[in-house]
Image: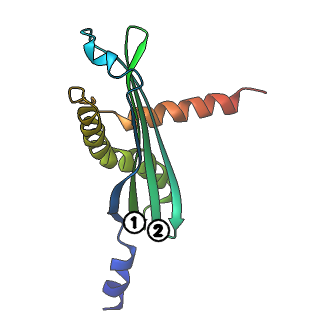
Amino acid sequence: MTDQQAQPQDVPVFNIEKIYVKDLSVEVPNAPAIFLERDQPQMEMQINAQSDKIEDGIYQCVLSITITAKIKDKIAFLVELQQAGIFRIQHIPAEAMEPALAVGCPNIIFPYAREAISDAVLKAGFPPLLLQPVNFEVLYMQQQQQQAQAAGQPN
């Protein structure tokens, strides 16, 4: 009986506590003239994920996305979003914690960010913008390789 009571406390926990927009900015610096342009805008996306421990077993992950759309040399719109999530992560092995924060949490947050950006672009007067899925596992592996290379190179 004692073993059964102790066992549930050691069960791995990965729960979403809250998903929210931490910061959202939309700029249309060349309005109204930009709406008369007929060319398709060229999109540039920058994405970054950062996680912080809030308290024991509670973590915040913030996905920062910047979308810059240009028509010729003029900015059509600029969207900056920080989509965040609070996660309860407990009883997972130490070696799994970093991938959980760098891959698992951003994978959960990204669809919400995608929707917020599409809505913001639509409300700014442009057609909805559907961001392509992001493979956070590949981004994490690339970051690990870059860190390993940097650590192996003399200063």
Residue at 49% from the left image edge and 30% from the top image edge: 142
Marks 2 and 1, how far apart in space? 6 Å
In the picture as drawn, the residue positioned furthest to the bottom comes out as: 1
Which quadrant does the C terminus fall into?
A: top right
Residue type marked 2: Gly
Q: Residue furthest front?
A: 32
Q: Which quadrant of the figure contains the N terminus?
A: bottom left
Q: Where 51 falls versus 80 (above or below)?
A: below
Disc 2 designates what residue?
57
Neighbour tally class for label 2: few under 14, some 14-19, many 20 plus, Cα within 10 Å: few
Query: Between residues 3 and 64, which one lies in front from this camera angle?
Result: 64
Identify which residue is drawn at 28% across, 11% down.
Answer: 37
Is label 2 in contact with label 1 (beta carbons under 8 Å)? yes
Q: Quadrant of residue 4?
A: bottom left
Instruction: Judge by depth and name the residue closer to the eye, 101 or 35.
Output: 35
Question: What residue is disc 1 on?
Answer: 88
Residue in the foreground of this view, choosing between 4 and 94:
94
Label 1 is placed on what type of residue? Arg
Bin the neighbour count of mark 1 within 10 Å (Cα to Cα): few under 14, some 14-19, many 20 and up: some
Out of 41 and 98, give the one closest to the viewer: 41
The total number of labels drawn is 2
